Image (spheres, grey):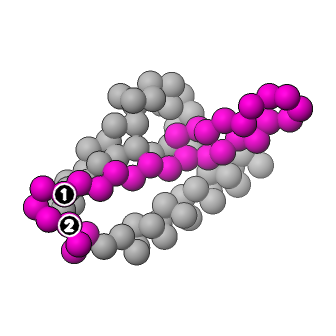
């Protein structure tokens, strides 16, 4: 079930890349892409969000990945991807 969840994340990530249009952006504009997986927990436990993508893009396509800087534990989750 875990692998299926990661595969669905990648399918959606690919779809977003295909429809992403940066023509609306000015030279100083930046676009933040955040994505991940919701983890539904049983009983009284709180549901959680596991971040898998956190990057900022400029109009010229330059991308800066902030995932491990903002979420240091996310590197451990990404080893399963």
Badge 1: residue crowd in 10 Å (few <14, some 14–19, many ≥20): few
Q: Is residue 20 above or below residue 9?
A: below
Q: Estimate the x, y position of residue 39 in percent, counting from the top left.
A: 70, 41
Check disc 1 and report its element: helix, strand or loop.
loop
Residue span colored magenta: 22-51
Left or right of 28? Residue 10 is: right
Cα distance between the residues tagged 1 and 2:
5 Å
| Magenta stretch contains residue 46 | yes
Assess whether mark 2 and mark 1 are in contact (beta carbons under 8 angstroms). Answer: yes
- Say if residue 79 shows up in the picture: no
Residue at the location (68% across, 52% down)?
5
Which percent across, then down, holds residue 48?
A: 66, 35
Residue drawn at (50%, 50%) of the image: 35
Q: Nearer the viewer, residue 80 or 18?
A: 18
Label 2 neighbour load within 10 Å: few <14, some 14-19, many 20+: few
Residue receiving disc 2: 25
Q: Quadrant of residue 70?
A: top left
Left or right: 30 as drawn, with respect to 26: right
- State whether residue 49 is above or below residue 63: above
Residue 4 disc label: none
**Badge 2 element:** loop
Residue placed farthest to the top in the image? 72
Residue lying at 20% horizontally and 66% vertically, measured from the top left: 25
| Residue 7 in sight from this viewpoint | yes
Residue wearing tag 1: 29
Q: Is residue 39 magenta?
A: yes
As drawn, the residue found furthest toward the right would be 43
């Amino acid at each position: 079930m875990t692998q299926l969840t990661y595969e669905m994340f990648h399918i959606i990530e690919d779809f977003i890349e295909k429809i992403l249009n940066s023509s609306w952006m000015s030279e100083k504009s930046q676009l933040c892409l955040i994505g991940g997986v919701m983890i539904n927990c049983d009983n009284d436990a709180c549901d959680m969000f596991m971040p898998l993508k956190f990057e900022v893009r400029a109009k010229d396509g330059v991308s800066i990945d902030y995932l491990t800087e903002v979420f240091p534990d996310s590197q451990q989750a990404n080893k399963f991807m």
